[in-house]
Amino acid sequence: MTRILSDLAPILFRHRLTEMTVFVTAACNMTCDHCFVIDELNKKSSPLTVEELKKMAPHIPAMQRVHVSGGEPMIRQDLPEIAVTLSNDWNAGYVCVPTNGWYTKQTINLIEHFGQHGKGHLRLFFSISSPHAEDMDEFVHKKGAFVRWRETVKQAAEAAKKYPNITLLAVSVYTDHNQHFFPELVKFVLEETEVDEFSFHPARSHGTYRPTLDLVNYRKVLDEYFRSGYQGSPMMRAYRQMLREEHLKILAKEDEAVACNAGVLRVVVDPNGNVYPCEMRGFPNGDDRESWHMGNIRDADFDMPALLKSERARAVVDRVADEGCLCRHELDTGAALISQPKFQVRLLARAAKHAMRSYPDVRKKRPAAVA
Ligand SMILES: C[S@@+](CC[C@H](N)C(=O)[O-])C[C@H]1O[C@@H](n2cnc3c(N)ncnc32)[C@H](O)[C@@H]1O
Ligand code: SF4
């Protein structure tokens, strides 16, 4: 029952937490050109332990998704226990873990442990910036990164075969560096790698990183991908396509209509247990971090709903609403959109349209995804 509630949470609840991002480490072995966490990487921190995550569990409402983030999550040796705790104790419908693909053995350990003990779903995202080895190594500033990525994905796909509750994805960020050859990257991922799914989104600016993105080209890439590359169900095709379309409008400053619910539907926990409304307001980005600080989960006896009810947290939520935010973060845009009845109706209509059409299966190595 809780698990069904987890899946439906974003549709049923408009005024309470349905998603969370937990930064489980600040450590990383790379320094990618676009990284929005770059200024926080490898700083001394005290991330939540498995025991502390378990203490949070009785207070956590049914949640659709919990995003693990970092730094590089695979650096945490106890990541397999963390993922299973979020799935089994928190009852998260999906546990999402991004990785740069460097740590092959740890990735296999995570898959085996979650496959054997996890009750929900694990979505493992392998970040890739280019189909060319030298180019990717340069972008992430780590020699051998591309070759390690390929080996890790290959071994992960073999290990994950046994576990239907584990999905492997490649994830790319559309940057000023790769936008000129992005279709080549899409083709490479779909035809040459062993992942089940692919996901991509445009780079967000932060600090001095201000990429000039060709959004007309991005639109073309999106259209082509959803016409001939995407392999998921009609509902997921509709949701992902519509989310990206809405997000694109926001980026092109054509539409400011998505009222941001950050701090209500979704919060971010930093590698010291501090809670903020989103990644752009508090951690890791945004000016005046202290003013977006909703509280520390350790000070709130690990009770997230109680923390969010505090005067301080409610003042932050009011400020998010008052200041009106042109949200550039797809996770927040998605959480806000899916909770709106108008969007839900449009989504159903678009899904029905997709269900009546057939789309080509371009994947060569793996069966179609069932996301
Ligand atoms: C911060 S990383 C942490 C996990 C892991 N180290 C990795 O790179 O996958 C999480 C995701 O954020 C993406 N990312 C980094 N900087 C970004 C930016 N400026 N805009 C959008 N996504 C970004 C990364 O490419 C990665 O897919
Ligand atoms: S691997 Fe991930 S956390 Fe590390 S620098 Fe790259 S994007 Fe940032």
Image (cartoon, grey):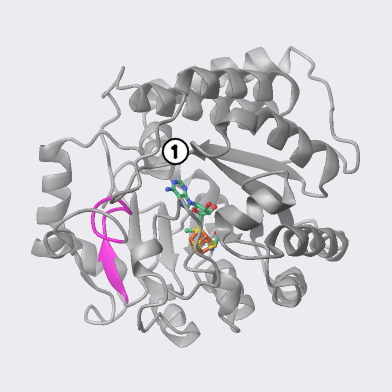
Give the side of residue 246 with respect to residue 84, left or right: left
Point 58% across, 39% down: residue: 200
Identify the residue position indicated by label 1 in the image: 11
Q: Position of residue 119 (x, y in %)?
A: 67, 66
Residue 249 in sight in this render: yes
Point 49% across, 63% down: residue: 31
Asked if the magenta segment contains residue 280, the reply would be yes
Question: Magenta: predominant secondary structure element?
Answer: loop
Name the image quarter holding residue 94.
Answer: bottom right
Eyeballing the image, is 356 above or below 97?
A: above
**Total marks in image:** 1
For the view shown, which residue lies furthest in the right direction?
365
Pick the residue in front: 276 or 150.
150
Point 22% across, 68% down: residue: 307
- Considering the image in quadrants, where does the N terminus appear? bottom right
- Considering the image in quadrants, where does the C terminus appear? top right
Amino acid under disc 1: Ile
Residue stretch rendered in magenta on the structure: 273-283
Give the side of residue 207 with respect to residue 81, left or right: left
